[in-house]
Image: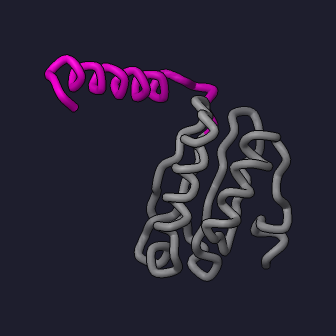
Amino acid sequence: MKSLAELQAIRDRARSQVILRENNDNAIRVLVGMATCGIAAGARPVLNAMVEEVAKRGLANVTVTQTGCIGICQFEPVVEIVTPGQEKVTYVKMTPEKAVRVVNDHLVNGNVVTEYTIGANS
């Protein structure tokens, strides 16, 4: 960054992205359980992998955020994907590698990765 104008351009670009996400009722929400149990099980690398992959693919309609305890601590790290008009999908025992696959298969192509869901791991 070399000037005040460059700093203002960065600020304006960041604001437009935040406004886009806040006003988009049709956005897909990705919730990563980041309570103590999730963090202890490795949720932070999963969150980082999800954010990086979503950004890399330029998925403007996807919001990745962290949440508290989802209530199934034995299955941490847990990721929930909420798509408007569809049933919530809960992925369990996630890893950064699984997170990348979920972004590619579920968020990009619309195919739930059933072997990572809670029903497949209970």
Q: Which is more toward the observer, 116 or 25? A: 116
Outermost residue to the front? 2
Q: Main secondary structure of the magenta part?
A: helix
Q: Is residue 24 magenta?
A: yes
Q: Which is more toward the observer, 31 or 87? A: 31
Residue 98: where, in percent of width, then height? 70, 65
Please name the residue shown 47% across and 78% down the image: 37
Please name the residue shown 74% across and 48% down the image: 104
Q: Is residue 72 magenta?
A: no
Residue 41: where, in percent of width, then height? 52, 80
Q: Number of callouts in the render?
A: 0
- Reply above or below: 42 against 106: below
The colour scheme is one colour
Q: Which is more toward the observer, 57 or 64? A: 57
- Reply above or below: 5 against 65: above
Quadrant into which the N terminus falls? top left
Residue 4: where, in percent of width, then height? 14, 21
Describe residue 37's horizontal placement relative to residue 104 as left or right. left
- Reply above or below: 95 against 14: below
Q: Quadrant of residue 18?
A: top left
Outermost residue to the left? 4
- Reply above or below: 35 against 23: below
Q: Quadrant of residue 108?
A: top right
Describe residue 59's horizontal placement relative to residue 85 as left or right. left
Magenta part of the protein: which range?
1-28
Quadrant into which the C terminus falls? bottom right
Please name the residue shown 48% across and 49% down the image: 65
Q: Which is more toward the observer, 103 or 119? A: 103
Please name the residue shown 63% across and 39% down the image: 57
Residue 63: where, in percent of width, then height? 54, 40
Describe residue 2's horizontal placement relative to residue 31 as left or right. left
